[in-house]
Every structure is written in C-alpha cells, then in structure tokens.
Image: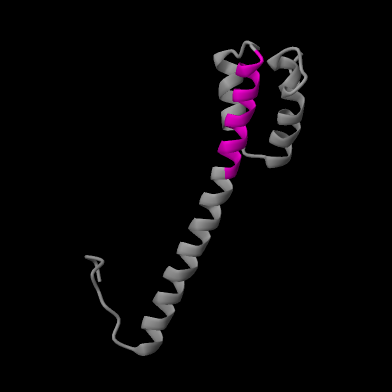
Amino acid sequence: MANGNYEYQSDFAKRYVAQGRTEGRAEGRTEGRAEGRTEGRAESILRVLEARGIAISAEQRARILSCTDMPTLDVWLARAVSAASTAEVIGEG
C-alpha cells in the first residue's frame, strides 16, 4: 500500500519478503566489511607516512582516503614503508 505499512498475508509472500530482507542485510554486512578494510588500509598508509615524517598534502590525503581498490592500497602501503615522498607512494610525478 502507499503508506509502506502493508503486511502480506500469504506465507509465500511473507517468506519472499523475509528472504529479501535477509539477503539485503547480508549484502550490507559484506559491503560494510569491505569498506571498513579499505578505510583501514588507507588510514594505515597515512599513519606510516606520518610516523616517518613525510609531508602529505590535503589533495594526497583525499586521494588516499577515497581509494577503494584494495590491490592499489596494498601497493601504496608497501611503498609507504620506504618511499621518500607521498608522491612516490601514490605514483604522482
């Protein structure tokens, strides 16, 4: 119904709706975990650079934090351990 409070009466419809909710929650948890891992990896890159005293511009920080590609973040983290600059880590210049 229009108000969104309609409750299905048939067992089939109830199971179908419940299945959709269950699948949606599972998908949301999976996406949330993946997003958490990429955010954590990006934060680790920044922490390594900061601990090493390497300057990070606002643009570079934003680029690192906005990256959602785990293989790229893994490469950047490995580079952050020995790179001389943030540009070297993220492949600028």
Where is residue 70 drawn, in percent x and y? 68, 41
The residue at 38%/83% (across/down) is 13
In the image, the segment drawn in magenta is 37-52
Q: Nearer the viewer, residue 14 or 22?
A: 22
Work out whether 45 lies above or below 23: above
Is residue 67 visible in the rendered image? The answer is no
Which image quarter: residue 90? top right
Q: Nearer the viewer, residue 24 or 13?
A: 24
* Placement of the C terminus among the 4 image quadrants: top right
**The furthest residue to the front:** 51
Q: Position of residue 29 (x, y in %)?
A: 50, 57
Q: Is residue 3 above or below residue 63?
A: below
Instruction: Decide whether residue 39 is among the magenta residues.
Output: yes
44 in the magenta segment:
yes
**Residue ID at (40%, 87%):** 12
Q: Is residue 30 above or below residue 54?
A: below
Query: Which residue sits at x=57%, y=37%?
Result: 40
Classify residue 80 by image quadrant: top right
**What scheme was used to colour the molecule?**
one colour
Q: Is residue 46 left or right of residue 91?
A: left
Residue 92 image point, x, y percent: 74, 17
> Magenta stretch mostly in which secondary structure?
helix
**Residue drawn at the location 73% of the way across and 40% of the way down:** 71
Drawn side of residue 4 relative to residue 43, left or right? left
Which quadrant is the N terminus positioned in? bottom left
Residue furthest bottom as drawn: 11
Note whether residue 22 is visible: yes
Along the line of sight, which residue is nearer the eye, 87 or 44?
A: 44
